[in-house]
């Protein structure tokens, strides 16, 4: 069992999580025999949070409930509220994940939170463009490890810019190994181009007979 912990906070950027949470939670394109995935929202309190898109999310569990193991994954979405001191506990937990080899996946504003804690100083990473992190994290020393790409995977750390959500999702899914390789490439090609031949290649890559109407993106 793989447990995906999704940190939720006020103002989180809904769209940045959409691709990866939808696929990991539904399992609609998983390969035969893929590990089961449990997705849990987590926060610093049980109080509901309001996303940037106006959606209300009630956290499933608290930070202290997180079980850090090699099969755990922590997703950190972007938000303009990361500077609040109440998020320090999840950044400390992030350090535990990285030290143990568990996956940490941070996008947009969450990369600044990691930079403020020194977690990007010695690892390849990306964010919302060169110079962005320095604007909000004066103590950041990882400039020489910055890679100007939409999403960057460095072993168990996967970071992305606000425009890199699709590639970020692909790299997370690839790390988890729950899609077949042909399925993952076709999935990414279809959602990045919209070309119908990639959708049919995606359907053909799935194990067993897939009902196209059931799997078609809605």
Image (spheres, helix red, strand yellow):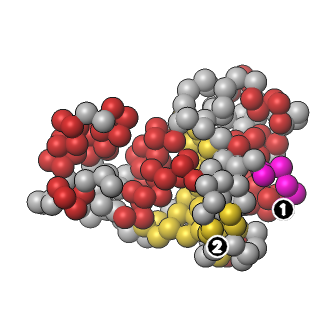
Q: Is residue 124 left or right of residue 176?
A: right
The stretch drawn in magenta includes residue 2: no
Magenta range: 81-86
Image vertical order of residue 58 relative to residue 171, above or below: below
Q: Quadrant of the N terminus?
A: bottom left
Q: Residue at x 81, y 46 (%)?
A: 117
Image vertical order of residue 128 relative to residue 114, above or below: above
Q: Is 200 or 99 nearer to us in this picture?
A: 200
Q: Is residue 156 visible?
A: no
Q: Is 207 or 43 nearer to us in this picture?
A: 43
Q: Residue at x 55, y 70 (%)?
A: 40
Residue 121 point in image, percent of width and height: 76, 34
Q: Residues within 10 Å of mark 1 (few under 14, many from 20)?
A: few
Residue 182 point in image, percent of width and height: 24, 42
Q: Residue 86 shows which numbered tag?
A: 1
Q: Which residue is mark 2?
A: 59
Q: Is residue 97 left or right of residue 153?
A: right
Q: Secondary structure at mark 1?
A: helix
């Amino acid at each position: 069992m793989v447990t995906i912990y999704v940190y939720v906070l006020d103002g989180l950027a809904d769209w940045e999580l959409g691709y990866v949470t939808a696929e990991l939670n539904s399992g609609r394109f998983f390969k035969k025999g893929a590990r089961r995935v449990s997705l849990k929202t987590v926060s610093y309190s049980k109080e509901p949070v309001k996303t940037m898109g106006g959606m209300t999310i009630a956290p499933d569990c608290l930070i202290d409930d997180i079980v850090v193991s090699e099969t755990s994954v922590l997703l950190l979405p972007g938000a303009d509220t990361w500077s609040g001191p109440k998020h320090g506990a999840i950044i400390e937990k992030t350090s535990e994940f990285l030290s143990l080899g568990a996956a940490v996946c941070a996008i947009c504003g969450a990369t600044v939170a990691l930079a403020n804690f020194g977690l990007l100083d010695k690892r390849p990473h990306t964010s919302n463009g060169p110079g962005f992190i320095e604007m909000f994290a004066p103590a950041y020393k990882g400039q020489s490890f910055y890679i100007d790409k939409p999403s960057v995977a460095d072993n168990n750390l996967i970071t992305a810019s606000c425009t890199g959500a699709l590639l970020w999702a692909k790299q997370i899914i690839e790390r988890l190994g729950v899609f077949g390789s042909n399925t993952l490439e076709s999935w990414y090609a279809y959602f990045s181009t919209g070309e119908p031949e990639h959708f049919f290649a995606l359907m053909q890559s799935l194990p067993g007979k897939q009902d196209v109407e059931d799997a078609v993106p809605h």
